[in-house]
Amino acid sequence: MDEDEALARLIALAGTAAPDAALLRAVVEEASELGARRALARLGLADAAARDDMVDLRQLLGAWRDAKTSAWKAAVDWAVRGALALLVVGLAVKLGFAGLLR
């Protein structure tokens, strides 16, 4: 019996009598399982290689985040160095050491 048939039988059983909590829970579990499988199939993640694909995507996303963080740190580092260099040049000009800058 496939999942569609199991769900149909549970719903039919629930419609014939006053459903108890266990029957309702079984209907909900079967429906959610079926819905999850359909959603994964529509996304192309229902095959055996899907787990490996997700691992690869997570690693790629982690590498992208690391690269982005490193790029921001490098940009801030260069901006701070540039500002400090301008400060030193400004102090040298202000104190009359402009001849040493040539």
Image: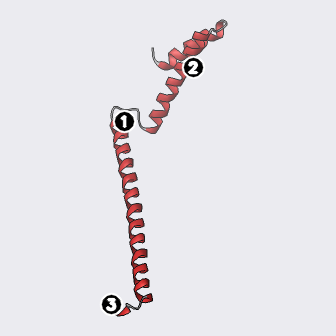
Residue visible at 43% across and 83% down in the picture: 91
Residue toward you, 68 or 75: 75
Report the coloring of the rendering: secondary structure
Q: Residue furthest right?
A: 18
Give the residue pinned by disc 2. 28
What is the three-letter code of the residue carrying label 3?
Answer: Leu
Give the residue pinned by disc 1. 50
Q: Secondary structure at mark 1?
A: helix
Q: Earlier in the sequence, mark 3 or mark 2?
A: 2
Q: Earlier in the sequence, mark 3 or mark 1?
A: 1
What is the three-letter code of the residue carrying label 2?
Answer: Val
Location of residue 4 with respect to 65 vertically, above or below:
above
| Disc 1/disc 2 C-alpha distance (Å) | 25 Å
Give the residue pinned by disc 3. 100
Mark 1 closeness class: few <14, some 14–19, many ≥20 residues within 10 Å: few
Q: Is residue 17 left or right of residue 4?
A: right
